[in-house]
Image (cartoon, grey):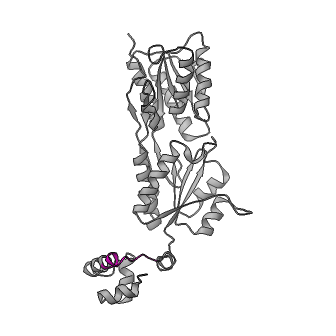
Amino acid sequence: MVTIHDISKETGYSITTVSKALNGYKDISDKAKNLILEKAKEMGYLPNASARSLVMKKTWTIGVVFEEQTGVGITHPFFGDVLNKFKKHVEAKGYDILFISESIGRNIKSYLDHCRQKGVDGIIILCTYDQNENIQELIDSPIPSVLIDFNVEQTNCVYTNNFKSLYEAVEYLYEKGHRKIAHIYGDQFSYAGAERLRGYKQALIDLNIPLSDDYLFEGTNYSLAEGYQRGLDIIALEDKPTAIIAASDNLAIGTMKAFEEYNIKVPDDISIIGFDNIEISALIDPPLTTINQDKEQIAAEAADSLVLQIEDKKKQYQKTVIDGILIERETVKKLN
């Protein structure tokens, strides 16, 4: 195994200079740094994680707190994809990720206790509720963190502009001639769900479309099964909407399945728009018109803001709001 002593002998630089070059210190010349790094790569040097942590006073580890109430877990189509992309970005910056639980063995601990025990440098929090006591404890702690899909003042946040996305979806349907527009709304305890419903309602007000409770349907878990049930509820209406905006693609696809079973054609009989632009949305028949959340940008912004906070703890928190983009496919019909 190649050590810094070996690199020192090969390059002629002192062990101290080699150590500084390998650990990113700036008080050595670029010439020395480049030569040492090139030689280390050539010799197949791999840094010792424990030694590196002692030198840098860092573990080069980011904790992942993933808590959502739908029961889908890590396969959640939005959070799972964001996390996978986030992992790629932080690994490029030299960090590993570590999943954080509330319990270690038989010892029941909080997320914060676990983070402190593992000595993580920062935390990415993916959750559907920020009011959870243990989540709030993390946000309020001095450990740098970034929160996905929420807007809070105490830490870095990255989220889609859910209000604007739903507002523009209603405008899009309005321009297509629709006036009877329903919404299958998401969990109102989550920031995203509440903002999407607010955007829908405000668009109706601004376009002088009466808001009808008959056209509001609950889809708390954003699931296919809920979408199917809401589809049955819509089928039972005497005065059906001409268009539906669902708070997730899964809700939209489940609704379309119910319509298919009752021979209601999409978009000929009812138009529908989803939210998230998950992979399957482009492959169903007909392909789903949906609102794209730029998961690559969300992950990149989250990684950048968190690493900046880790490396400069005096830096102000960043709030990054990313526009959703309507992806036109084949589930919306223009009315005469």
Asked if residue 248 shows in the view, the reply is no
Q: Nearer the viewer, residue 194 or 92?
A: 92
Indicate the quadrant where residue 262 lies. Answer: top right
Q: In this rendering, is residue 297 above or below 98?
A: above
Asked if residue 220 shows in the view, the reply is yes
Quarter occupied by the N terminus: bottom left
Which residue is painted at 55% across and 36% down in the image? 193
Which residue is painted at 60% across and 13% down in the image? 237
Give coordinates of residue 92: x percent, y percent: 39, 62
Give coordinates of residue 132: x percent, y percent: 65, 49
Q: In this rendering, is residue 36 above or below 221?
A: below
Quarter occupied by the C terminus: top left
Give coordinates of residue 50: x percent, y percent: 52, 77
Q: Is residue 200 left or right of residue 132?
A: left
Residue extending farthest to the left is 31
Q: In this rendering, is residue 114 above or below 232?
A: below
Q: Which residues lie in the magenta part?
A: 39-47
Give coordinates of residue 6: x percent, y percent: 37, 87
The mark tally for this picture is 0
Q: Is residue 249 left or right of residue 133?
A: left
Residue extending farthest to the right is 106
